[in-house]
Amino acid sequence: MPTPTARVISTAALLSTATLLSCSLAACAPTARDAGRGADGGTATSARQPENRFRQQTLNWRDCPAPSPVQGGGEAPDALPDGTRWQCATMRAPLDWDKPNGKTLGIELIRARSTADADDRIGSLLFNFGGPGGSGVTTLPALATDYEKLRSRYDLVSFDPRGVGNSRGVRCLDPDEAEEAEEEVDQAPDDGTDETDALVEFTELTAAACEKNSGDVLPYVGTTEAARDLDLMRQVLGDEKLHYFGISYGTQLGGVYAHLFPENVGRAVLDGVVDPTQDMMEGALGQAAGFQLAFEHFAQWCVEQRCTLGEDVEAIVDAAVDLEADLDETPLPTSDGGELDGDEVLAALTGSLYSESFWPALLVGLEAVTGGDGDVLADLAEAIGQHGSGGGPDDDTTDDDPTDESNENDAFRAITCDDSSDRYTVADVGRRMPEFTKASPLFGPGLAWSALSCAGWPVPGEAKHPEVSAPGAPPILLVGNTGDPATPYEGAARMAEQLGEGVGHELTYRGEGHGAFDSGNPCVRDAVHTYLLDGKLPKPGTVCDPEPLPEGK
């Protein structure tokens, strides 16, 4: 399982800031998956006819059960405050879209019906919250209050993309086996060939396990296939256009959809925009710089709080680098019998930079660890630095039943490696390491080594980066955050350029954390609401300023 540092690599790279490539593989020549497709992203007429059985299906909506272990476990979603109950259904889709008469798989959906009457209802608004690998079926109810205003004119709909959760979720190593193997692996080797060999061995072991346990689905979990599933959802849900809200990796999925089906795009918002011009290594390098910038912003806030971590930003950054190195060498025992090591420090830092609201807790944790108390940072690493957990840090099932764990990390790897044709070696990482260290002495090494995540992968990737050109599509609102660590701000401008003239419409948020809408910023939310509900875009060049973070801890 990748560490949280590795997990933020974008597949647009994943999961994000380099010079534009003048001619990508996807742009210069059709891929094998594009062969035989028409301009609408479908296949030729003779091949499309068997797909009608999928378009004509009727979904059997039912009250949602509790999430399955592969979705992360937990309780069934509560009804919304007005009594609206969450409904779930399974949509059948071709396993291989190029062979619609072949095997099928189920795509799990969830919805909350709109409060609007028939005259005011626009249709369904489909959400993808990123990852890749996150279960939309579990995420949408958890975040529903943030999107309640949109339910005034839309049914809110999300889904487990293929390979995720209940949609034929990819499984690799057994959770117990993975945990045991991870304990022997340093995700950022710095002590010579033994640590490097162990990381490569673990990566290849994971790839082999993925092939053994999920080999039948691995070739078919990429973003192109997911985009075709989106268009099937549009039709099965009865919508003429796809109205869409994509966050983080979800912006890549939205861009690929717009490329395949430009005439079917409705009102679409992409928030926390990945850079579609980058390969995996470039994306990792961009994120190294993004997380470094975000940590420096945290450090500046810390100085303004008169914290004890250092007298200025440089001193605080240096202290964090030293802390990670020291605990990588000699972990700090915690009160529960565990220990805080360098990887967990990076997990706590990375997770805390996803939202400015976590900064006060991070400050408490860093000040405590200087006094020999690692409990707060260890708790942060578990609660917000860990992806794919089957529960929160206080949920007994997390420790007592390791199989009650989502497949988010396995799906992340599978989708990333299905999308990206990059297969890097230890030598490749070594050549690029000086660039990563220069970009971020704190986050750079781990992000550089995470480029090995597709080593030994049994399925060839589609291209170096996604094709998102969408001439003829209506305007798509792109929300970029100047302080975003995971999808740096420059990605929005590059997505706009790649979508084509008149398609990408940018909105800037001068904030912190990953994405913008989730921050709760009134300016951002008003712009998004106005576009999705009324069809009015913000004025070109609109900039939303942040609200100040409260003082204190």
Image (cartoon, rainbow, N blue to C red):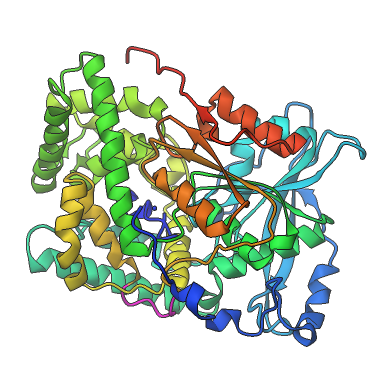
Q: Which image quarter holds the C terminus?
A: top left
Please state which of residues 40 and 56 is positioned toward the viewer in this rendering: 40
Horizontal arrangement in the rendering, residue 209 relative to residue 504 (left or right) = left
Say above or below: 156 vs 296. below
Q: Is residue 126 above or below residue 212?
A: above
Residue 285's quadrant in the figure?
bottom left
Question: Where, by quadrant of the figure, is residue 383 drawn?
Answer: top left
In this view of the protein, which residue sits in the foreground, 251 or 425?
251
Residue drawn at (26%, 63%) of the image: 181
What residue lies at 82% left-to-right and 81% top-to-bottom? 49
The structure residue drawn at horizontal position 33% and vertical position 22%, both measured from the top left corner, is 360
- The answer to whether residue 546 is seen in the rendering is yes
Looking at the image, is 322 positioned above or below residue 232?
above
Q: Which residues are magenta?
A: 455-461
Q: What is the chief secondary structure element of the magenta stretch?
A: loop
Residue 141 location in percent, x, y?
64, 39
Count of numbered circles on the image: 0
Question: From the viewer's perspective, is residue 295 above or below residue 477?
Answer: above
Q: In the figure, is residue 236 to the left or right of 385?
A: right
Which quadrant would the N terminus be assigned to in this image?
bottom left
Task: Work out whether residue 74 or residue 500 is closer to the camera in this orientation and state it.
Answer: 500
x and y percentages locating residue 271 in the rendered image: 54, 43
Q: In the displayed structure, does residue 430 sit left or right of residue 481?
A: left
